[in-house]
Amino acid sequence: MSTTPESPVRSAAHDAGTGFGCPFCALACDDLSPPADNRAHGMDCERARAGFTLALEHTEATPRLAGVAATWDDAVAAAHTLLRNARLPLFHGLLGDLGDARSAWSLAARFGGVVDHRDGDAMARALGVYQDSGWITTSLGEARNRADLIVWVGEPIHDALPRLRERLFECRQRLHTDAAPEVVELGARPRERIDHVRTLHGGRPLPHDDPDATQLLEQLRNARYAVFLIGRLADDEADMALRTAGELVRELNEHQRAALLLTGQGPGDVSTQLCGAWRNGFGLRTSLARGYPEQDIKRFAARRLLDDGEADLLVWISSLDATPPPQTRQPQLVFGHPAMRFDHEPAVYLPVAVPGVHRAGFIHRGDAMRLVTLFAVTASTLPDLAALCARLLDDEAVTPC
């Protein structure tokens, strides 16, 4: 079973002078130079370099059944049997591009499953705040071109988004100012500071002096366009920190401009969310077990479904990351990166092509404002998830083991 790149898109994109898309973090940068001679060592971004190098070194892989090499026909048939017999399959991981997201939602609809991303906890927190009270957000491009004050809420995320500082804080080409924005970092536990700023902004006294909050309020009042960049937040205060920041932004907008900037958690999260919303009216943590979509961001959390035994099959989808699925007592069906290795082999492992390396595709940037084109850069006979999905959805095309 094989697929081939749609066209020699790497050379075509390079000849046209267009940017080259990278799918390996939520920034989805589209200004890279393509790997030369199937080598990514010259790429400036460490995350891009690691992602391309791993995929370029693993262009082929063999399906396995419980760790034993199998033919594609036998492996697909075994996957079909697992899906058909599952009471409630959980489609999880979802570290892929838009095509992978479409396939996951199609499989969930056909076999009556729940869809939740690997970073579903952080995504659900943001979704809960948005559903409860709404918010005012901006894009990476708007923040880059207009923001004169960036308040970094939470821990730095340079390891997850290596080029964020370069592209947002230190960029030299800005449409509305030549000056770099002032950056204020609040650290890992920002909720109290933001709450104090809200109190002072409302003209109310604090229970004790907080010079840092007083200074931040003065900076916010002097800013033409303040942006609250949401980084990693401690679990025990993440929800309240995000809610408090959203309320402060809303209050500031009564007299000036301010916005939240959410950059996404990792590859594939925004594509999964938007694809689900287009298809069903809902995004992650949606069940299709009853034949219609039901969303519940607490009930359909992946970890809870696995721990409580409500899900009886884990379907792990990860074409962009070679990290294996978490240990579970449920059987596992893995559509994975060809470099993926396991401490405990899943019931079925089907290696798939890496989007942006082995095949063309599309992925959404973390702020959900742009769909970035991905080009194939090397030949591979690995199928993409869409090809496997088409076989799994066609009962007559699947030969029983």
Image (cartoon, rainbow, N blue to C red):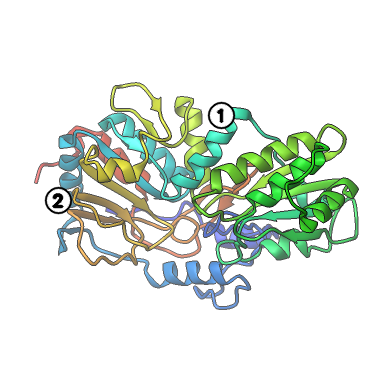
Q: Secondary structure at mark 2?
A: helix
The location of residue 118, given as percent across then percent down, is: 41, 50
Image disc number at residue 74: 2
Q: Give percent across and percent down for residue 160.
A: 55, 62
Q: For the residue marked with disc 2, what is the amino acid?
A: Asp
Q: Which residue is mark 1?
A: 131
Q: Give SS at disc 1.
A: helix
Left or right: 213 in relation to 28: right
- Please tell me which residue is depicted at 84% across the width and 60% down the height of the picture: 173
Q: Amino acid at mark 1?
A: Gln
Q: Which mark is residue 20?
A: none
**Which residue sits at x=22%, y=59%?**
63
**Furthest-bottom residue in view?**
41
Q: Which badge, 1 or 2, comes first in the chain's sequence?
A: 2
How many numbered dots are placed on residues in this image? 2
Tell me if 103 is positioned left or right of 350 in this view: right
* 32 in relation to 254, above or below: below
Q: Name the foreground residue: 3 vs 306.
A: 306
